Amino acid sequence: MTIGEDAGRIGEDTVSTGEDPGRDSQEPHRSVGGDAQEGTPGDDAVLRRAVGVLHDEPDLGWEEASKRVRRMLRRTTRRARRLTATTTDLAGFGPADRLEVSERVVLDALRRAVSTTAGVAPVAIVLHVEPHADGHDRCTGVRLELVVGYGTALTALTGHLRRVVVQTLDDLLGPSEWVVGLDVVDVEADDPAP
Amino acid sequence: MPAPSSASTPVPDGLSPRAATQGPEPAPSRGSPRWGTDVALARAAGLGDRDAFDVIAQRHGPALLRFARRMVRDPDEAQDVVQEALVAAWLSMARWDGRSALSTWLFGITANKARDVRRRRRPAPVDPEVLMRHEVDVVEDRAGSTPEEALFRSALAEALTDLPQRQRAAWLLTQVEGLTQAEAAVALRMTPDAVRGQLGRARQSLITKLEDWR
């Protein structure tokens, strides 16, 4: 073995700890457990054992850590703007009343709404937000970047998604003339949904 | 204001609705075929899908904890490292660009957090409770293996602790976690040549430290 031959394959060679009794006698010897330096069979054996021990280590407390992570994530929120909804269609709302909806709520609803159709997944959802005359932020539209599965009927898909997006925005922020942009940015062999 | 009703918008010919399990806020089920590749999960998590991120955490968390456990001395610190790493990943998920594997990206964040923890660490009086806990760990470890195995684990732990951090990180990522040298270089923000050099030195140090076990 030369150093150059082994350089790119160390991880691949050494993570596998499966024993092959005939390997040492039939193949050029490869060093185990680190750089591409010539190692003796004894060196390799002890490093292989070390890798095996570490890889097969019993549970190190992941269950407990997992609970902590979940608790922390529940308390962790991403920054979001407050969007003022149109309330003219709502009974009981007067001109002075204002309804605010978190941008995060709108983004989540759009993600879920798009995800109800097979063969497409959103990559990015960008709300167009402009300050209104009343000084509050209002959403005027949305641009979605999409990845679609190979063979998806794009014309039907985009028409359908446009209706889905408008319906979602109407439901959350009140009826408006929404500007909806749909960009297919990638195509995957299978359904791109998780 | 009514709940969003867009899910009921009829799907036209040529398209199909996703399976019913795709409803709002499904309970995460790691064995379910609904949960696919890291790329798809990361894409959804980047847009705020907590269930998708939970699957990512459950999928990669044990390996991150194993790595962290060897990068910092204290088991509680290791849990802190992983917790901070996963919260950071959640907050910056949308910035993962897919140029490296998701696991590589997560290991990189974990390595950074481990470094932060070591920097924050200051000399402090030894807490007897911590000592007791380590003692219990050792006893429990030995209860699950032969004395010879337990001694080897102990020798290995000591040998790893003695390695400089960069050597240890490079060795663990490539040899235990299965990253290629190029991936480890991305995770550790080093050049592949530097990783290779660290690996060579780590290997020699470990062989020397574990000489009695050959």
Image (tube, coloured by chain):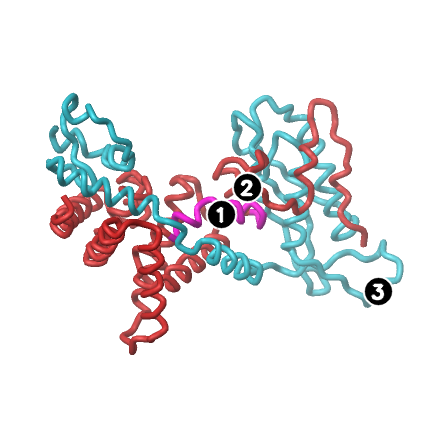
Disc 1 chain ID: B
Q: Position of residue B46 (x, y in %)?
A: 53, 47
Question: Does B48 appear in magenta?
Answer: yes
Q: Position of residue B154 (x, y in %)?
A: 24, 56
In the figure, the shade used to draw chain A is cyan
Tell me, yes or no, whether dots 3 and 1 are on the same chain: no
In the figure, the shade used to draw chain B is red
Question: In this orientation, which residue lies closer to the viewer: A147 or A22?
Answer: A22
Q: Which residue is mark 3?
A: A95
Marker disc for residue B30? 2
Disc 3 chain ID: A
Q: Position of residue B28 (x, y in %)?
A: 59, 45
Describe the element under mark 2 as helix, strand or loop: loop
Tell me, yes or no, whether dots 1 and 2 are on the same chain: yes
Name the kind of residue labelled 3 in the image.
Pro
Name the kind of residue labelled 2 in the image.
Arg
Describe the element under mark 1 as helix, strand or loop: helix
Name the kind of residue labelled 1 in the image.
Gln
- Furthest-right residue in view? A91
Q: Which residue is mark 1?
A: B58
Q: Which residues are magenta?
A: B47-65
Q: Position of residue B136 (x, y in %)?
A: 35, 64
Task: Please give left or right for residue B107 compared with residue A132 in the image.
Answer: left
Mark 1–mark 2 Cα distance, whole angstroms, equals 8 Å
Task: Please give left or right for residue A159 compared with residue B211 in the image.
Answer: right
Q: Which quadrant of the figure contains the N terminus of chain B?
A: bottom right
The answer to the question of whether label 1 and label 2 lie on touching residues, with beta carbons closer than 8 A, is yes
Above or below, B180 against B63 in this view is above
Q: Which quadrant of the figure contains the C terminus of chain B?
A: top left
